[in-house]
Amino acid sequence: MDREYLPDLQDDDVLATTSYGFKSSQCNGLAYDPTTVYKVPVNYDGSSRGAGATSDYAIASQFGSYRNLNDISSRPTAGSTITVRVTNGSRQSSWYPNNQAVTIYGDVGTFIVGYVPTSGSNWNTSNGDLKVTVVFATGTFPLTDVKIATGTPTKNVYYTYTGAQTAMNYSYVASGAVVKNDFFNECDTAADHKGNTKFRPVYAATSVTVPNSTISDAQNFANWQKHYKSRMLTMKAGVSLAFRDLDAKYRIGLTTLSSKNVTESDDFLDIRDFDNDPLKTVTTRQKWKFYDKLWKATPPSNQSTPLRAALAKVGQYYAKKAIVSGGGNQTYDPIQYSCQRNYAILSTDGYWNTYNEATSSPKYGPYQLDRTTLVGQQDGGGNGTKRPMFDGGSVTKTTEERWTRTEKRYMRVDTPA
């Protein structure tokens, strides 16, 4: 759950963090998407968990040394080549070799990212003229008090896709390995500061607004970075917003996947009325307890996903047949009425595995209410059940054929001549 990419890929197939695809919503379901507004998650009382800090992406703070330039009168277009003048003295030929990435900036939110052209004579040490091919430009011009640094911003970059492939169009073979087709190969291409014909580098800026909203791209990016960058962060943010308006008309509890018993702890909360009664001490309110445990939850270090065991425990809990810490029998009954509906909402990032299951007492696994007998194959089996529902079962198909036999008899009759 602490991984920063979707979907699940086998270890040999995971996109490199230095690839275009890792930082593009074309290839990574968790990458920043500039068309999505990332809502700030909330606490138990609906208060904000805090927006991300855009100061982390200020261009000036991302570079140490810089040199000075003359003013730039207007914003250049991407793909154009401009000439700027370096005003520092003692200019060296080694400062700006061909293909050197550069960032030009001044006022907050106004900057240009580009590179020295790859061929020709582009850096004049005599008068300080430097040619720069523009990759990205944003903000308000004219730009004064201009500075130039070598390299590109690294904290606020993402890539937009301009090719023809369908987003997230992964294909797999039977073993689960990804197909290395055109889609995957485009995604796994090593990123370059110039971009390529499929991916364009973009830098989140305060001067750009997210479509159909009033939030700046930089603020939206900061919110994503703080609250949605990983699977775990996304899950927590989504749950906090989904449960925000629920009240004591609902009875809600919580368990982590690896919590093997029903004793209250940071990993387990009994089902009770989802109250936020202001007359109660804050820490005794069920809604506060739920959110407290939600925000404290951390993914296991061994990447365990014991989904079968966790769901079996919930069933045992509803039946008042689960175990408490130390192996004793459950005494608290979460059920109030014999005909009430009960649900389990499962949040997970992948297929089940057997890590953290236990086959010895106290058992933790896909067991029936007696905590001994396996649940077994419940989803059918054979070729008719698709993965991931198919979990190894088989079926025997018997075909009965019935035949009806019709007999015709003929009688020979001889007549006299």
Image: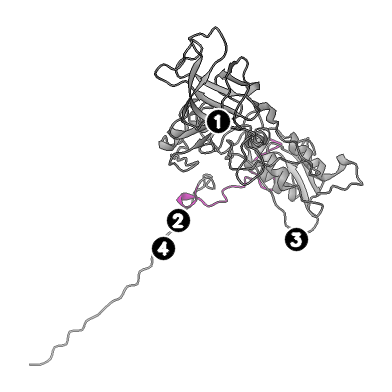
Residue 415 is situated, as x and y percent measured from the top left of the image, at: 12, 91
Say whether marks 3 and 2 touch (CB < 8 Å).
no
Q: Mark 3 — residue?
A: 339
Q: Mark 4 — residue?
A: 400
**Which callout, 4 or 1, points to the residue nearer the camera?**
1
Residue 345 is situated, as x and y percent measured from the top left of the image, at: 68, 48
Query: What is the spatial separation of the Cα atoms under label 3 and label 2, in whole angstroms?
Result: 37 Å
| Whether residue 324 can be seen here | no
Measuring 10% from the left and 92% from the top, which residue is drawn there? 416
Say whether marks 4 and 1 touch (CB < 8 Å).
no
In the image, which disc is placed on residue 58? none
In primary-sequence order, the first of circles 3 and 1 is: 1
Query: What is the spatial separation of the Cα atoms under label 1 and label 2, in whole angstroms?
Result: 76 Å
Nearest the viewer among 161 and 394 is 161
Question: Does the magenta portion include 312?
Answer: no
In primary-sequence order, the first of circles 4 and 3 is: 3
